[in-house]
Amino acid sequence: MLDPSTPILISCAQHTVRDAAPDALLSPQDLLAHAAQKALIDAGGGAGDTQRKLKITQKIDSLAVIRSFADSAPQFASPHGGCSHYPLAIARRIGASPARCFYPHLGGNSPQMMLSLLAEDIRAGRSRMALLVGGEAIRTASLATKAGQRLIGRKIMMAR
C-alpha cells in the first residue's frame, strides 16, 4: 500500500502563444495563470467539472513560481514593468490562497529544485497540495512593444 504522504504528480499543462493579435496578448502573470488553470482543469477531470477544479484549487497550500528572465536581470527587464509578488499574483488569478509561496532565484536548476522542495514538504507533512508554475513572456513583451501596446494585468493599454 502507498504511504499517504507520498508525493504524487497529478497534472501538467502548457500554454503557448506564438503569434497573437495585439489585443489578445497577455501579461506574464496571465500567461502563467492560464497554464495553471489548464493543469487544474486536467487534474479536476475536465473543463466541465468546475466544482472539482475549485475544490482542488482551494486545497493548494504551497505555490512556487519559477523566476523569469525579465524579473532577474536588468538586461532582460520588460519595458512593460513587472510584478511585486508573482506567486500571489498567480494565486489571485486562479482563486488559490496558499499559506506558503516560493519565488526562487533564477537558475537552470530552479524547476527541479522547487519540485524537490515541494515534494519533500508534502512528504514531511508541511504541505498537502502544491502548485509549481513557470514560464517566459519575452516574445509576448516583444510583440506588444512592436504593436505599441503595454501589457498590464489582464488589460492591454495603448502606450503613450
Image: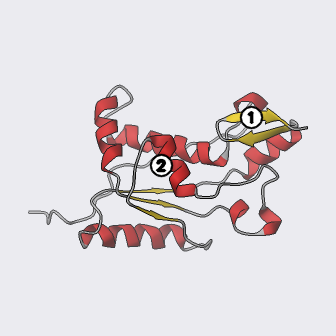
* Discs 2, 1 touching: Cβ within 8 Å: no
Q: For the point 35% across and 25% down, which residue is it?
A: 48
Q: Secondary structure at mark 2?
A: helix
Question: Where the N terminus falls, by quadrant?
Answer: bottom left
Q: What's the distance in space between the residues labelled 2 and 1, CA to CA?
A: 21 Å
Decide if residue 127 is on the left or right side of residue 156: left
**Residue type indicated by callout 1:** Ile
Q: For the point 34% across and 30% down, which residue is it?
A: 50
Q: Label 1 crowding class (10 Å Cα cut-off): few <14, some 14-19, many 20+? A: some
- Observer-nearest of 84 and 22: 84
Q: Is residue 87 above or below residue 41?
A: below
Q: Secondary structure at mark 1?
A: strand
Residue 104's label in the rendered image is none
- Observer-nearest of 146 and 155: 155
Name the residue that disc number 1 marks.
156
Q: Position of residue 86 (x, y in %)?
A: 58, 56
Q: Is residue 53 above or below residue 12?
A: above
**Residue type indicated by callout 2:** Ala
Q: Label 2 crowding class (10 Å Cα cut-off): few <14, some 14-19, many 20+? A: many
Residue 41 image-quadrant placement = top left
- Observer-nearest of 73 and 158: 158
Residue 19 image-quadrant placement = top right
Q: Position of residue 30 (x, y in %)?
A: 60, 42
